[in-house]
């Protein structure tokens, strides 16, 4: 019995036999868990055909419907999948997400009482660059009521039809869809203790993602200003006070970032998925994000946006981010920890 549709929008500029085979194995496991896998593939025709040879027996593999014309092509894939999905319950995930059967069970159970389910991610394995990303997850978990931004969510198809299209011309579409649901009055389960594994990117891909993730925050002016001010404040301290005062400044940044990551790890059952050592990578993430913010600023002034595929996207966040986020935070505060 097919109890949900697992919707995966994907696009590849090059064919990887290893990745394609690994995803095929994952799709079989999802089939065994009662998921009908629907892959919406925006890859060029030659790569689409290579994917199809491997995946056709374990999923429904379809091209993107080009009648959708959002700048973020992943959103076009999501709307294509919405039209083709055969079940009411839909689990939407990025290509680096790996659900287990118990996690699918829990998501489907929560969808019996909510329109949307927003779980959390953890990273495994943990090369050093993934530890920086894991530290970021913990900091978000410490300071945000809704905790970190996941690369997956689940929703009822009727709810998506009811709330209508969300802003598909932004980089940060994973969270934009959640905030659109919240603003439109959908019931959202902020499952802050339901952790789903996320595979870390290869180092080269991680480097490519640095300025993009910083650019996604440009609509959050206070946050962007905070990272832009890190070196400026250091220069000011060095100019106004003795240069050895910089030592105290950096020690303060290091101590605060580690403390925030530790607080995020102590929230709920995150300690089961994040080793203590991750907290000590928090200062390195602060410095990385500072550099990446300046890097993204270059893209903003040079091109007016950030490259995403063959397009330039000027917006990191969309029209529902602020108002939807406010509603989401209030709703999360009223819910017991899931």
Image (tube, rainbow, N blue to C red):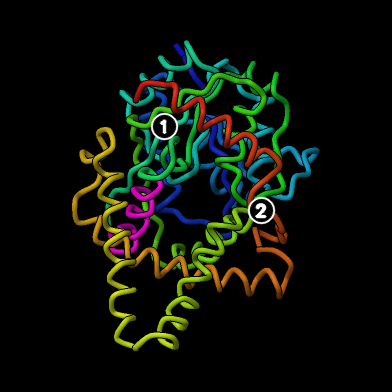
User: Badge 2, how many Cα within 10 Å: few under 14, some, many 20+?
Assistant: some
Q: Nearer the viewer, residue 232 or 171?
A: 232
Q: Quadrant of residue 174?
A: top right
User: Badge 1, how many Cα within 10 Å: few under 14, some, many 20+?
Assistant: many
The reply to whether the magenta stretch includes residue 133 is: yes
**Residue under numbered circle 1:** 119
Q: Nearer the viewer, residue 327 or 68?
A: 327
Residue 113 image point, x, y percent:
48, 11
Residue 124 image point, x, y percent:
29, 48
Q: Is residue 47 above or below residue 65?
A: below
Res. 293 mark: none
Residue 161 image point, x, y percent:
70, 21
Q: Quadrant of residue 247?
A: bottom left
Bounds of the magenta segment: 127-140
Q: CA distance from mark 1 to mark 2?
A: 32 Å
- Image side of residue 178 versus residue 107, left or right: right
Using the rendered image of the protein, determine whether residue 110 is visible from the camera's viewpoint.
yes
**Residue under numbered circle 2:** 44
Q: Quadrant of residue 243?
A: bottom left
């Amino acid at each position: 019995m097919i109890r949900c549709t697992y919707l995966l929008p994907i696009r590849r500029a090059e064919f990887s036999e290893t990745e394609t085979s690994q995803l095929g194995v994952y799709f079989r496991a999802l089939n065994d868990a009662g998921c009908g896998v629907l892959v919406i593939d925006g890859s060029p025709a030659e790569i689409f055909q290579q994917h199809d040879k491997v995946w056709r027996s374990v999923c429904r593999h379809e091209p993107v419907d080009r009648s959708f014309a959002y700048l973020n092509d992943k959103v076009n894939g999501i709307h294509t999948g919405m039209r083709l999905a055969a079940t009411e319950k839909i689990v939407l995930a990025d290509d680096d997400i790996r659900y287990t059967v118990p996690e699918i069970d829990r998501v489907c159970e929560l969808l019996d009482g909510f329109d949307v389910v927003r779980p959390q991610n953890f990273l495994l394995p943990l090369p050093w660059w993934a530890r920086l990303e894991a530290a970021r997850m913990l900091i978000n978990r410490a300071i945000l009521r809704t905790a970190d931004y996941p690369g997956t969510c689940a929703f009822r198809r009727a709810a998506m039809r009811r709330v209508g299209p969300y802003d598909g011309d932004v980089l940060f579409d994973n969270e934009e869809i959640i905030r659109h649901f919240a603003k439109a009055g959908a019931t959202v389960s902020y499952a802050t203790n339901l952790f789903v594994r996320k595979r870390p990117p290869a180092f080269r891909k991680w480097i490519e993602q640095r300025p993009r993730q910083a650019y996604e925050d440009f609509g959050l002016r206070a946050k962007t200003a905070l990272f832009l001010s890190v070196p400026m404040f250091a220069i000011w301290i060095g100019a106004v006070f003795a240069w050895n005062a910089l030592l105290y400044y950096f020690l303060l940044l290091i101590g605060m970032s580690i403390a925030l990551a530790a607080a995020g790890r102590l929230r709920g059952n995150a300690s089961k998925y994040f080793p203590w050592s991750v907290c000590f990578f928090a200062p390195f993430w602060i410095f990385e994000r500072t550099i990446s913010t300046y890097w993204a600023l270059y893209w903003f002034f040079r091109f007016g946006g950030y490259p995403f595929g063959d397009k330039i996207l000027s917006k990191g966040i969309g029209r529902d981010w602020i108002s939807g986020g406010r509603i989401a935070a209030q709703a999360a505060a009223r819910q017991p920890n899931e």
